[in-house]
Amino acid sequence: MSRARGLIAAAAAGATAAGAARLAYAALNQWPPAGTKTWSRTNHRGEPITLLEGPAVAVGAIAGVLAQAGLGSRSARSAAAMAVAGAGAAAFGAYDDLAGSGDRRGFRGHFGALRHGEVTTGTVKLGGIGVTGIVSAALAGGSPADVIINAGLAAGGANLLNLFDLRPGRAIKVAVASGALISAGGSRGGSGAGVAAPLAAALALFPDDLGERAMLGDCGANALGAMLGAAAAGLPRSARIALLAGITGLTAASEQVSFTKVIERTPALRWLDMLGRPQGGTKGGLGGWVSPKGGPGGWVPPGETAGGVWGESSPPRQAQFDGARTTLRSAEHTDLTPPEE
């Protein structure tokens, strides 16, 4: 297949993925499985958000990958591998979203509970994503060493991206950066074109995520990360080993270090993290214009912002505007380290 034809097929797959994601999101919001309440959570400002973005992104990404295979731009094996990785990660992620209590976090928390005979929903999710990662890698083919590496990329990518789904838009920004890295790595099997569908599906719902109306949740973040990991199966082995080492290193670091704290303390990362959000982050920030829902907005000087922790576990906080100056007032102390980390 010529490069031009491959790009056209990737663009068509992206358009299919984006359209399917938006359609699925609209349908799920109209007819939410088990009711709206099941998928509703409260964000850091005490306002409701929905987790339905996650399954919609998964549906769109899988539809785009299958469309790409139908256009002849991807092999059936490669498309099946990505679809299985995404579907499995989405299913187990949704299970953890809806049935999990959130009392245990990270590998240490889940495996610690397992040592005491407690099987958490997170443990089930980790095991399930591991198994679907192996099935995905087996479908992609290759030597036993390739299958092991590719399984690690799918399962590891699913887990790692979920660790970034702690602020509006952050996980999707990381996914875009990861997709660009995979594309730049070159491939023998079209990894660059392979990331088009999952990224297009995520970007189709990016405004809702960034605008604090919805979030990926485990379902969406796990599916998106798994599909990007599966797409990387087309990279040369040396590149895949390096990528897997990076995923492993970051995952291990997350058990000891808060990614959010690192981002907050690194100006360039903080600027990227805040880019496009409707309001600021935590105290000590870079400043900027904030426009909360229902308010006129105002300028936040460096060192004072109106944001907070992304997630239902955080106590609600209200930004109070006074002319052009914004201050954050809280009725109780809030730990800025996300409970997920």
Image: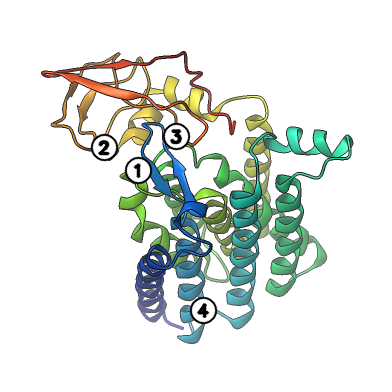
Question: Residue 334 at x, y = what percent?
Answer: 47, 18
Real-space Cα separation, disc 4 to disc 3, in angstroms? 33 Å
Evaluate if marks 2 and 1 touch, with contact meaning CB atoms under 8 Å apart. yes
Return the residue at label 4. Answer: 66
Depth check, front residue: 228 or 112: 112
**Mark 1 belongs to which amino acid?**
Glu
- Disc 2 or 3, which lies upstream in sequence? 2
Depth check, front residue: 295 or 110: 295
Q: Which mark's residue is nearer the viewer, 1 or 4? A: 1
Q: Residues within 10 Å of mark 1 (few under 14, many from 20)?
A: many
**Mark 2 belongs to which amino acid?**
Pro
- Disc 4 or 2, which lies upstream in sequence? 4
Question: Residue 319 at x, y = what percent?
Answer: 28, 23
Return the residue at label 2. Answer: 278
Q: Secondary structure at mark 1?
A: loop
Place residue 272 in its image quadrant: top left
Evaluate if marks 1 and 3 touch, with contact meaning CB atoms under 8 Å apart. no
**Mark 4 belongs to which amino acid?**
Leu
Can residue 193 be seen at all in this image of the molecule? no
Residue 143's disc number: none
Return the residue at label 3. Answer: 310
Real-space Cα separation, disc 4 to disc 2, in angstroms? 35 Å
Question: Residue 206 at x, y = what percent?
Answer: 35, 53
Depth check, front residue: 127 or 181: 127
Q: Residues within 10 Å of mark 4 (few under 14, many from 20)?
A: many
Return the residue at label 1. Answer: 212
